Amino acid sequence: MMTIGAFSKACRLSPKALRLYDELELLRPARVDPETGYRYYAPEQLEQARLVAWLRRLGMPLAEIREVRALGPADAAREIRAFWSRVEAETASRRDLASFLVDHLTRPLAGPCQSDSSDPSNRSDPSKETTMLELRCATLSDTGRVRPANQDTAYAGARVLAVADGFGSGGAPASGAAVEAFKFLDDEPLPAGSVLNLLEDAVQGATEAVREVAGPTDEVGTTLTAMVWTGSQLALVHIGDSRAYLLRDGGLFRITHDHTVVQSMLDEGRLTPEEATVHPQRALLLKALTGGGPASAPAAAPAPDVRLHDARAGDRYLLCSDGLSAVVSEDALRETLTTVPDPAEAVRTLVAGANASGGPDNVSCVVADVVSTTAR
C-alpha cells in the first residue's frame, strides 16, 4: 500500500485533489485507517489516477470523468474523442467571433454601393470612375409536394438576405417574426465597428419576436440563416439547419454548420456521412429560436454562429432551408448555380429540383450575386 503522499508524487495529483476525488467518489483510496483517517492507495490504482489527471488537463468536467472511468478502454476512447470534438467546435466558434471582432476593429466598412470617400484620389478627381460592389438577388419559397402549408420564410432586401424554417403548430408565424426582426437593417447605416452591435440587436429582436408568437412552448420555433451586406462584406448569422453556401471560382463551399444531433454525431466520429443521410434523427435540432418558457422567466437565448465574409466580384451566395439541401445533392446545387446565370431563374430551377425529388418539405432559397459596377 502507498501513503497519500507517495501516491500523489507517483500520479502527479496533489493530496488536496486526491481528497476531493475521494469525497466525489471519483477515485476512492484502497483503504482508510479507521483511527487516523489516513488514506492508502494500491499501486494498481496509479493508472486510474493518471487517467483522471490527464482528463483534468484536457478540461473534462468531473462528472464526465466519472463516466469515462467506468467504461472499458474502447468505449472510454470514444467518449474522450467525442468530448474533444465538442471542445474543438466551441473553440472554432470563439475563433470565428475573434476574427469577426478583429476585422471590424481594424478595417472600415463601406456602405452599400458606395465608394470610400476617404480615398484622396476620389476627392481630388470627382470625374474618376470608382469600382463598387453590389448585390443582385432573387428569392423563392414553395410549399413542396407533401406539406399542407408553407412554414418557411425567405427574404432578400436592400441589405438583408434571410431564410427561416419554422416548425410546430406556429412555425409559419415564428419564421416570419424572425426574418421581420432583421429587416430594419435594410435601412440602417452601417458605420465601421457597429455591425456587431446591430447584429446583436437583430438576434435579440428575433429571439423575442419568436417567443412572443410561440408562447410558453419550445415545440414552436424556427431556424434562421441571415446575411447582412455592408457594401464590401457579408456578415452571417446562423442558427439551426438552414444553410448558406458560397460559389467561388467554380467551387461550392458550405459556410454554415448544422446545429443538429446528426451533425454533432458526425463531428464526434459516431456516424459516417452515409449513415447520417438515413439516420432517423437527422432533422432533430440542437439549437433554434423557440418559445421555451413563460415571459416572466424567459430562457436564455441560444447563441448563433457569427461570421464575416469578404465579398469578391463574381461570388454567388445561396441561402436555403433544408427542404432544398436535404433532397438536392451539393453537386446538383453547384451545377445549377454554375450554369444558370440569372438569380431569378436559378431559384426557380433549385425549387423545381427539390420538387422533382419528391418535395417532402417546404423549400426556400435566396441566390445573391456579387457584381462590380462603376460610378463617377
Image: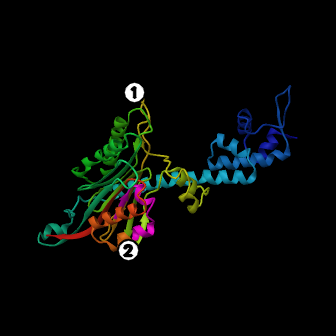
Task: Judge left or right: residue 196 versus residue 371.
Answer: right
Q: Secondary structure at mark 1?
A: loop
Position above or below: 345 against 257: below
Magenta span of residues:
317-334
Q: Where is residue 19 drawn, in percent x and y?
A: 74, 35
Q: Nearer the viewer, residue 70 or 327?
A: 327
Q: Quadrant of residue 107?
A: bottom left
Q: For the point 35% across and 53% down, which residue is it?
A: 143
Q: Secondary structure at mark 2?
A: loop
Q: Where is residue 318 drawn, in percent x and y?
A: 36, 62
Please name the amino acid that badge 2 sits on: Asp
Say which label, 1 or 2, has the lower sequence index.
2
Q: Where is residue 186 drawn, in percent x and y?
A: 24, 52
Q: For the point 42% across and 69% down, which residue is it?
A: 332
The answer for how far apart the CA atoms under marks 1 and 2 are is: 51 Å
Q: Nearer the viewer, residue 233 or 282?
A: 282
Q: Where is residue 212 drawn, in percent x and y?
A: 34, 35
Residue extending furthest right? 1
Can residue 108 be seen here? The reply is: no
Q: Is residue 137 magenta?
A: no
Residue extending furthest left? 127
Position above or below: 89 against 24: below
Q: Which mark is residue 296?
A: 1
Can residue 363 be seen here? The reply is: yes
Task: Judge left or right: residue 108 versus residue 253.
Answer: left
Q: Nearer the viewer, residue 67 or 328?
A: 328
Please name the amino acid that badge 1 sits on: Ser
Task: Judge left or right: residue 259 versus residue 354.
Answer: right
Q: Residues within 10 Å of mark 1 (few under 14, many from 20)?
A: few
Residue that numbered label 2 is attached to: 249
Residue extending furthest top? 35
